[in-house]
Image: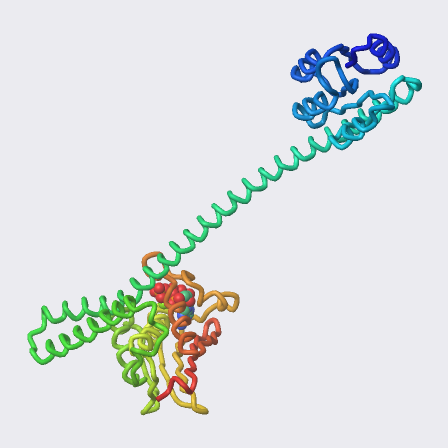
């Protein structure tokens, strides 16, 4: 861009053979039109066109596209303008008259290189922000998945809880059913009254489970703890199992030291023994169809702790399965018969009382479940 035709001619000659497309204009209006058209990468402009100043050209070019490079042609007298131009991000300036045409060609080549690099940078930044966008989308998706997982985990938890409640309630419920049926046919009034009292007892158990559930969040506190007599709880558990499980081939026996008390919730301790005795009875009953099956419950005291044991002479548990039996839903019983929650409940209750439950089993000989309640749960 220059109003002196001879300068335009010289420049054309300088860039002959270079891989550039040249456009020459002789006034500011045309210069601004070329910039506005957006087809220009580099501008060599006179400091002053007849109608527009070089600085204005520079500003218009940078506003249009910051990567456009501008070289200002200026006379010695206008070095100030040239420096202002550099401050405004002009690439360079060339002094008039054009004595060294190679100088201007080198400057153009360098400007070209700078521009290529800037373009490459811009491409990389775009690429980077696109990748960034992809990453953010992936992160967003992962967050969504995580939320879904947490949700389904919660649902699974509710499922486990519901199954656990069904499990806890089903034993006393079957007891009630059996007793109610017996009462219907019973002529002997005192006997029927005895059954009725047991029904009341079972109903209380169910009520306690429900109360327990509604105070679920408070379950860790001691507010419902009472002095639980082990012999009584075990006796009740045995009665419950005898009525609710198939036990026709099983003999039950207890060896319980008198005066054993736990500071606990009756309902939970009973739950432990119902599950262990029921498991033992179920295991023994199937293995001793012609008699001889036995389940023995023992309890006593040792170094201030209270221990209990449920022993059976059933089929035992294969060695590689022992570590699975406390897992929720682990069962070897047919669908509809076992939920696989019994031992998990035992484990959870024992943990709650800081107690321990251990199993010893010899396949073909029998199984022993040992419980130990620490001294501070004693009264
Ligand atoms: N005394 C035992 N002898 C042999 N196997 C046992 C004994 N106790 C537990 N098991 C094994 O451990 C598994 C898990 O027992 P758990 O009480 O947790 O569930 P379940 O008895 O199968 O079902 P549920 O208790 O819900 O009726 C049983 O299916 C059984 O294979
Ligand atoms: Mg069981």
Q: How is the image coloured?
A: rainbow
* Residue 318 falls left or right of residue 8: left
* Residue 213 falls left or right of residue 157: left
Instruction: Count how many numbered circles sit on residues in the image.
Output: 0
Vertical placement of 151 versus 95: above or below?
below
* Residue 130 falls left or right of residue 122: left
| Image-quadrant location for residue 78 | top right
Q: Quadrant of the C terminus?
A: bottom left
Q: Quadrant of ligand 2?
A: bottom left
* Between 195 and 27, the one nearer to me in the picture: 27
Which residue lies at the image location 43% right of the left edge and 91% below the top edge? Answer: 304
* Between 39 and 50, the one nearer to me in the picture: 50
| Image-quadrant location for residue 330 | bottom left
Q: Quadrant of the N terminus?
A: top right
| Image-quadrant location for residue 77 | top right
Which residue lies at the image location 11% right of the left edge and 71% below the top edge? Answer: 183
Q: Position of residue 182 (x, y in %)?
A: 14, 70
């Amino acid at each position: 861009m220059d109003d002196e035709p001879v300068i335009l001619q010289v420049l054309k000659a300088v860039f002959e053979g270079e891989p550039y497309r040249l456009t020459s204009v002789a006034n500011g209006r045309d210069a601004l039109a070329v910039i506005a058209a957006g087809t220009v990468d580099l501008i060599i402009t006179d400091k002053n066109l007849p109608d527009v100043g070089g600085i204005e050209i520079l500003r218009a070019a940078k506003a249009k596209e910051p990567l456009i490079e501008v070289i200002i042609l200026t006379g010695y007298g206008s070095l100030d303008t040239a420096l202002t131009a550099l401050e405004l991000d002009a690439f360079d300036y060339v002094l008039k008259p054009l004595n060294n045409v190679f100088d201007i060609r080198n400057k153009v080549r360098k400007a070209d290189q700078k521009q290529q690099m800037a373009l490459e940078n811009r491409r990389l930044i775009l690429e980077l922000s696109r990748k960034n966008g992809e990453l953010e989308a992936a992160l967003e998706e992962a967050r969504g998945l995580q939320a879904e997982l947490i949700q389904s985990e919660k649902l699974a938890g509710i499922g486990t809880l519901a199954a656990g409640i069904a499990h806890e309630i089903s034993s006393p419920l079957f007891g009630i059913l059996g007793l109610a049926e017996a009462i219907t046919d019973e002529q002997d009034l005192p006997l029927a009254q005895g059954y009725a009292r047991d029904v009341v007892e079972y109903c209380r158990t169910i009520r306690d489970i429900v109360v327990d559930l509604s105070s679920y969040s408070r379950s860790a506190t001691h507010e419902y703890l009472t002095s639980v007599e082990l012999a009584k709880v075990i006796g009740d558990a045995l009665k419950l199992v005898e009525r609710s499980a198939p036990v026709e081939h099983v003999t039950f026996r207890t060896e319980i030291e008198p005066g054993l008390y736990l500071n606990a919730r009756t309902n939970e301790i009973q739950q432990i023994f119902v599950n262990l005795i029921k498991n033992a009875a179920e295991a023994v009953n199937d293995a001793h169809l012609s008699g001889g099956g036995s389940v023995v419950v023992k309890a006593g005291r040792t170094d201030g702790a209270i221990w209990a044991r449920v022993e059976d002479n059933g089929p035992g548990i294969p060695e590689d399965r022992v570590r699975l039996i406390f897992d929720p839903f682990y069962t070897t019983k047919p669908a509809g018969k076992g939920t696989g929650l019994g031992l998990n409940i035992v484990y959870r209750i024992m943990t709650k009382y800081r107690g321990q439950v251990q199993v010893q089993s010899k396949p073909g000989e029998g199984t022993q479940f040992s419980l130990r309640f620490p001294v501070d749960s004693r009264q």
